[in-house]
Image: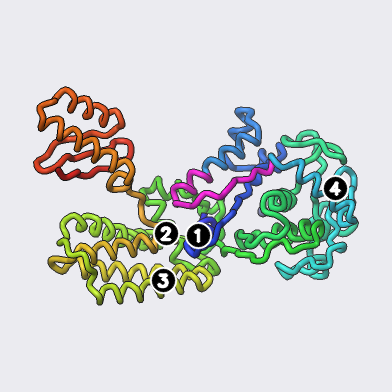
Amino acid sequence: MRRYIADDVLHRLLIVRGFKVRRIINITDVGHLTRDDIDRGEDKMLVAAVREKKSPMVIADFYTKAFMADSQALALLEPEQYTRATDHITEMLALIERLIAADKAYVSNGSVYFSVAAFPEYGALSGNTLSQLRSHVRAELKDEVLAEKRAPEDFVLWVKAPKEHLLQWPSPWGPGYPGWHIECAAMILKHLGETIDIHTGGEDHIFPHHEDEIAEAQAATGKPLARFWMHVRHLFVDSKRMAKRDGTFLRLQDLVTKGYQPLAFRFLALSAHYVTRLNFTWEALDAATQGWTRVTQVVSQLREQLTHATGKTTTTSSLKRQIDELLLRFNNALDDNLGTPQALAVLSELVNLSNKVLSTRATPMADINLLLETFLEMDRVLAILPQVPASSLEDDELAWLKKKIDQRTQLRKKGSFKQADAIRKEIIERGIDIEDRTGGVRYFKKATGQSGTIAL
Ligand SMILES: [Zn+2]
């Protein structure tokens, strides 16, 4: 999720800077699992799937849903589309056939391999050039796999499926399933075109996944797959890569179970630049929770103060100057390769400034408003503030309600209580409760939590 938080900051910043963003997230839901994998696996979900005779699709669906729930809890923007590998087998087969026709790939014993030697640009992203690859690739391969390949560094596009393989599709080369890299290459080419602007991923994807995606797409189209690559460094737990056997494999839900807020984890993720490794410890999450709470508390204090502040509508000019300066530094930090730690430092200064303003007497309403708006402006990119329902009704509905309440007041003045009651019923039917108070009518819309008072 750390990687997706970094992606989300980029997505949000591009929107704030006026770009129209077309983004897809690939769900590589083809279960490359054999019964052996499951037997060896310690994952309870997989074991349960076999015991309950569930298909890999059910497992993939389970994790897809869990990913989406976590995404929502972390306030990640939705992409234009989640593209699923299993919906794109036709496109993958077409791309593989195109590569075979161009002599960049070959069929061997029911599988199809990409011929690395036929793509001289191989290694440009990862630095793993052909000669470097050859020296260590051989040791890792089983003899029967090696025998199928023209060269040990060649990688698989289509895998001949053994009978027991749980997911397989017919192909011109016999039943099989796609290799991982071809899934992404085919989905990108279909939905975003031959050259995309930005391809993101975790650092563990650089090689082989992204290097092989480039080879497949570029060998077919002759054009670069992506103009920019953005790779997010690992999140380590207790200074090690997450591993189930060390008890360091954590999901967002594990944090929630312990009582932590997902957005406090988002705050922690933003506190490290995406190009550096982030070491997760519970102490670090505690510290992040403290920092996050400072921000959310001051924002709710500002919201509360809005109702008590004096009515002065002009902002104090010194405050305006200080805020302009903070916003400038905030934006510069983000524009400099998504410098979120620096942006959070500026946010912390805004918290200090707000506390100072809140502690002075008779603060002009305009000052409170300006501070609150600045928090919300910064939060368009950071997205760490919990969502609160809009305080009052939207303009259209509010105008409608004002008109109805006006009519009702006029009718009551004339003594037409029956007609006045009919209007009250009409308002209630729209899901809005009203209550007569001295000098006004208080309204409350249950569905959204929106409320306010209409002065009479
Ligand atoms: Zn991919």
Instruction: Work out whether residue 2 can be spotted.
Output: no
How far is the residue under mark 4 from the one under mark 1?
A: 38 Å
Of mark 3 and mark 1, the one earlier in the sequence is: 1
Give the label on residue 15, or none. Answer: 1
Of mark 1 and mark 2, the one earlier in the sequence is: 1
Of mark 2 and mark 4, the one earlier in the sequence is: 4
Do residues under tags 3 and 4 come within 8 Å of each other at their CB atoms? no
Closest to the observer: 72 or 34?
72
Residue that label 4 marks: 97
Of mark 4 and mark 1, the one earlier in the sequence is: 1
Do residues under tags 3 and 1 come within 8 Å of each other at their CB atoms? no
How far is the residue under mark 3 from the one under mark 1?
A: 16 Å
- For residue 164, what is the image quadrant? top right
Closest to the observer: 141 or 160?
160
Of mark 3 and mark 2, the one earlier in the sequence is: 3
Do residues under tags 3 and 2 come within 8 Å of each other at their CB atoms? no
Residue at image x 22%, y 72%? 316
Do residues under tags 1 and 2 come within 8 Å of each other at their CB atoms? yes
How far is the residue under mark 3 from the one under mark 2?
A: 12 Å
Residue 70: image location, x then y, percent: 48, 47
Q: What element does badge 4 sit on?
A: helix
Residue 213: image location, x then y, percent: 73, 57
Query: For the residue with label 3, is its CB less than 8 Å from the closest atom of ligand 1?
Result: no
Instruction: Work out whether residue 275 can be spotted.
Output: yes
Q: What element does badge 3 sit on?
A: helix
Q: Disc 1 vs disc 2: which is toward the camera?
A: 1
